[in-house]
Amino acid sequence: MSFKKRTEEISLHRNLEQKSTLELLSLMNAEDQKVALAVEKCIPEVAVLVECAILKLKEGGRLFYIGAGTSGRLGILDASECPPTFGVSQDMIQGIIAGGDQAIRKAVEFAEDSKTQAWDDLKNFGISKLDLVIGIAASGTTPYILYGLQACQKNQIKTACITSNPGSPITEYSDFKIEVLVGPEFITGSSRLKSGTAQKLLLNMISTTIMIGLGRVVDHKMVDMQLNNQKLIERGVRMIVEESDLNEFQAKELLLKVGSVRAALLSCKH
């Protein structure tokens, strides 16, 4: 499929090295404001993807993000934040990056060019038809992700993509296509900027909406969050006080005893 590589379009801003710090920051901010509007146009497609993901997870499946470079790191970030925020298992949402864990902090040369490694990585997690795999690639042409999704489809595993290049090759191997047209990057081709911001927004939306759909949020509260620091314990206490007749001392005592806001609130009702 032929397509125009939007992620390589020339920046709308020239002679950046001659501009003041204030000018650079203001221009970047102006470009960033375009991202949310671009993401807004994708919401109907995102909704269909999320509904599929919720069904998969309710049936015991898992959600995988696969990506390279910035895209891979953002997938890992989103996946890693779900257990502490929503109290789900570490296995439910997984982030995989081309080049393995060492690539989280340092680029691994040519890792994204492999046509077989993504599928090998997914097989190491015991990938199955119950699961859903989202490939994140601003360019839509990264071999690691392309061939990973292709292998998934060959094995009857549902796939999706997040890309900044509409009509790019990645869409051929995606059952759900999220094509977010953010326009030229502030620095030509630097897709860690607007494309990366769009990916972060979309991943936030996808995982958060999934968790709400799985019942991991009550009203607007993270009732299943892990109590792994004092700030979160204090937040949990405030939630309990707001929803019960307990004072702060009683709420904290109960929270530490039962181990979660959800359990504490259920205890108050009984």
Image (cartoon, helix red, strand yellow):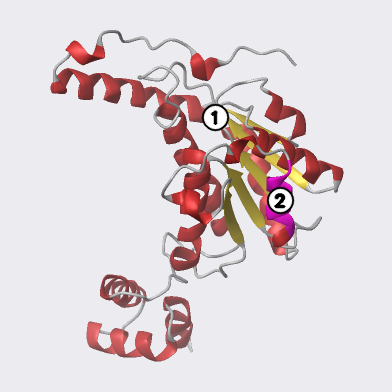
Please tell me which residue lies in front, 223 or 15: 15
Residue at image x 39%, y 29%? 193
Which mark, by number, is residue 138?
1
- Residue 222 image offset from top left, x and y in percent: 43, 65
- Residue 18 image offset from top left, x and y in percent: 18, 11
Q: Is residue 224 visible?
A: yes
Mark 2 crowd level (few <14, some 14–19, many ≥20, 10 Å Cα): many
Is residue 118 on the magenta stretch? yes
Q: Is residue 104 left or right of residue 244?
A: right
Quickly name the residue at label 2: 132
- Residue 243 image offset from top left, x and y in percent: 36, 74
Q: Secondary structure at mark 2?
A: strand
Please tell me which residue lies in front, 41 or 139: 139
Residue at image x 31%, y 84%? 251
- How far is disc 1 from disc 2 in space, using C-alphas? 19 Å
Which range of residues does the magenta coloring cover? 116-123
The quarter of the rendered structure image containing the N terminus is: top right
Question: Which secondary structure is most common in the magenta stretch?
Answer: helix
Is residue 10 on the magenta stretch? no
Q: Is residue 241 left or right of residue 206?
A: left
Is residue 96 placed above or below 232 in the rendered structure?
above
Is residue 232 placed above or below 166 in the rendered structure?
below
Residue type (three-letter) at the residue carrying disc 1: Ala
